[in-house]
Image: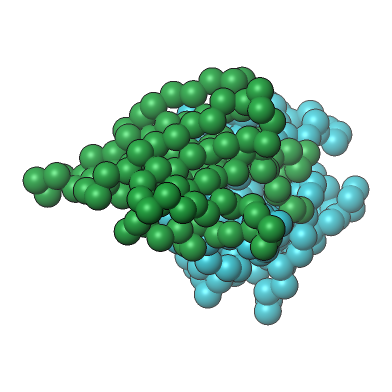
Chain colours: A cyan, B green
Amino acid sequence: MAAVVDVQEGNGAAVTWNLVTAARFCTADDPAPAATNPIPIPAAGTNRSYWKSHAIAFSGAFTNVTNVKIYTDGVGFGSGCIEYIGVETLTLAQYAQATGTPGTTGNEMVASHANIASKQLLFAFTSTSPKTVDAGPITSGRCKHVVTQLDVDPTAAAGTKTAETITWRYDET
Amino acid sequence: MECNPVLYSWVAVYNNGSSLSEFDGNGRHLFKEIDQDKLDQLSWASSDPTKTTYTVHIAPWQRVILFRRHHFNERTGEDYVLYALGWQATIDGRNYKSILFIDPQTNTARITENLG
């Protein structure tokens, strides 16, 4: 057996890390919302998803994990949808529950997350220019977590978006 | 999800002729079990005899580099793995490294001094 990896989402005030295989941006602090609490397209201004806190957890047999990075396919969800990732990558102690108005909009991460001071475009990070998440070494448990959020403006098209790909890269010895 | 990319496994050969394989009759050994003070050469080897074995010889002034680089697709669960093998050394206060990245999916290998 080699390293076992699980992508996890932090939820709740006293954080619980939930296994996710298909994260979905929505307007609730919910790791598996299905079609509930979508993000309404605003008539003006911006509506946002609740921010997402994601990390990967390592278990199984390995010496250590280093050089954890994250990247996308660079495509994004299309017009009117802007995906952000917090510049800071956070320790467990820096976790903050996502907040907002359920079913309407999430609070903006830089304004409302105590440990996110600025943000970047998530889909600017690709395989040739990934974002560093955690240099490590990690010998057990979870890497630092990233905070992501989807902004929606009036030019967005209604409906469920085609799934996009996020890839985690790490070095295992 | 378990990532178990064992297309290649490592084999350490010591300067007294003995060796340690990642997988043997005792199960799986970890990289930290390699006695680097006695290491003469280190290889990525496949159980498939048609696959190339990649070996680096380690001199006493070199420190070995060995890892699997995973690209784990969150949506599909696919784990694309590169195998890295090389050495680093501190010479006149500067760190030098040379790393071979092996991509079995494309059957290519490239040497770089950048861990990326």
Residue drawn at 24 percent across, 50 percent down:
B60
Whether residue B90 is visible to the viewer of this picture, yes or no, is: yes
Residue A81 appears in view: no
Q: Is residue B88 left or right of residue A57?
A: left
Image quadrant where one finds the C terminus of chain B: top left
Rendered residue at 49%/63% (across/down): B33
- Locate residue B80, reporting x and y percent: 65, 35
Number of numbered labels in the structure image = 0
Q: Position of residue B29 (x, y in %)?
A: 58, 59
Nearest the eye: A47 or A133: A133
Task: Determine whether B8 is above or below A74 in the image.
Answer: below
From the top left corner, tell me how far across and down residue B6 is, in percent: 67, 43
Task: Indicate whether A105 appears above or below A162.
Answer: below
**Which of the two residues, A45 or A122, is positioned nearer the viewer here?**
A122
Nearer to the camera, A14 or A79:
A14
Q: Residue at x 45, y 58 (%)?
A: B34
